[in-house]
Amino acid sequence: MKPTVPTIPELRAALEKEGYICEEEVVVTIYLALTLEKPLLVEGAPGVGKTEIAKVLASIFNTELIRLQCYEGLDEYKALYEWNYQRQLIKIQISRNSAAEDHLERNLFNEEYLLERPLLRAIRSEDKIVLLIDEVDKVEAEFEAFLFEVLSDFQVSIPELGTLTAKHVPIVVLTSNGERELSDGLKRRCVYLYIDFPSVEKETRILQVKVPQAGTRITAQIANVARYIRANLDLRKKPSIAETIDWARALAALEESSLNTDNINKTINLILKNKDDQDVFKNELGENLNKIIGKY
């Protein structure tokens, strides 16, 4: 049975229930991708909550999340299927010089020896699942071309087994960190969503939802520090939302109720994970503490 797509207010409530705080335009874009049964392509800097959308949708629809983690060198066989060569070799050895040898080739290439990879698992699923294709900008153009053809028809051809078509069109979420420009062919098949780092107000709310034990004052200060770092400092890596959540949890564990120079210096490794970045921030902190944490 095809899952019922919730209304926009219902979807917003469901996202917030799962702890995913977002703007109206994000909710509307997700709703349109679900309604049109088109892949959702989410682009943005690392750590802004792109992958989390797929996880939350799997929870909302109470279904399986199948993840294809992309990387340089990924090809269609690693993403789609492989044959279990070890079992095939054992079968060959057993069948050698036996009456079954005449049918050996046919018997070697059936579903008994098929190893499903994420894309084939998603297509052959008995239920409507969520397919996450993570960091698609890391693959080569050839694999991207193969991918958007699969996403057009949700079917694949395996020479030994024929054409396999999805029983249910998966909920597909693709993420990109923007390391390279994706093809027009892929974008044309998707509903596009760009997510930026959150405002201070939004990140404060996220922290209050994720780490309620931290208290309102320190979560607002953490959000201010994160905004200042991302906007004003030339760092190798800007802190992600997941890292500010970890920082809030660490400060709550230390029973800190507000930020100061001492507890910032002791815990800054939770959000800045490079010594040069830490040094840049500490030099800035010495002169601008109140400006950085806000007036709370």
Image: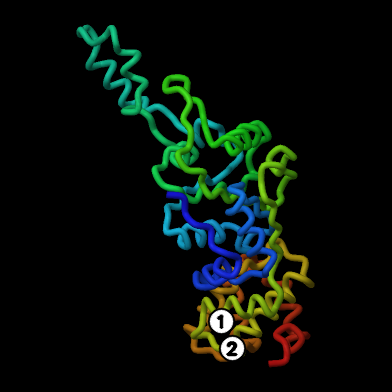
Q: Is residue 169 above or below residue 52?
A: above
Q: Residue at 33% of width from left, 19% of height from top?
A: 108
Contact, CB < 8 Å: mark 2 with mark 1? Answer: yes
Where residue 218 sits, quadrant-wise, is bottom right
Q: Is residue 181 above or below residue 163?
A: below
What secondary structure is found at the residue carrying circle 1?
helix
Q: How many marks?
A: 2
Residue bearing mark 2: 216
Residue farthest along the left direction in this orientation = 98
The answer to whether residue 112 is left or right of residue 219 is left
- Give coordinates of residue 123: x percent, y percent: 47, 38
- Give coordinates of residue 157: x percent, y percent: 50, 26
On residue 66, which mark appears?
Answer: none
- Give coordinates of residue 116: x percent, y percent: 41, 35
Where residue 206 sits, quadrant-wise, is bottom right
Give the CA separation, mark 2 to mark 1. Answer: 7 Å
Identity of the amino acid at label 1? Gln
What secondary structure is found at the residue carrying circle 2?
helix
Question: Disc 2 or 1, which lies upstream in sequence?
Answer: 1
Q: Is residue 170 above or below residue 280?
A: above
Quadrant of the rendering where the C terminus is positioned: bottom right
Asked whether 48 or 24 is in front, the reply is 24
Identity of the amino acid at label 2? Thr
Q: Residue at 43% of width from left, 29% of height from top?
A: 82
- The local crowd at label 1, few if under 14, some if 14 to 19, many if 20 or more residues have their Cα within 10 Å, is many
Q: Is residue 205 above or below residue 183?
A: below
- Give coordinates of residue 262: x percent, y percent: 61, 87
Residue bearing mark 1: 208
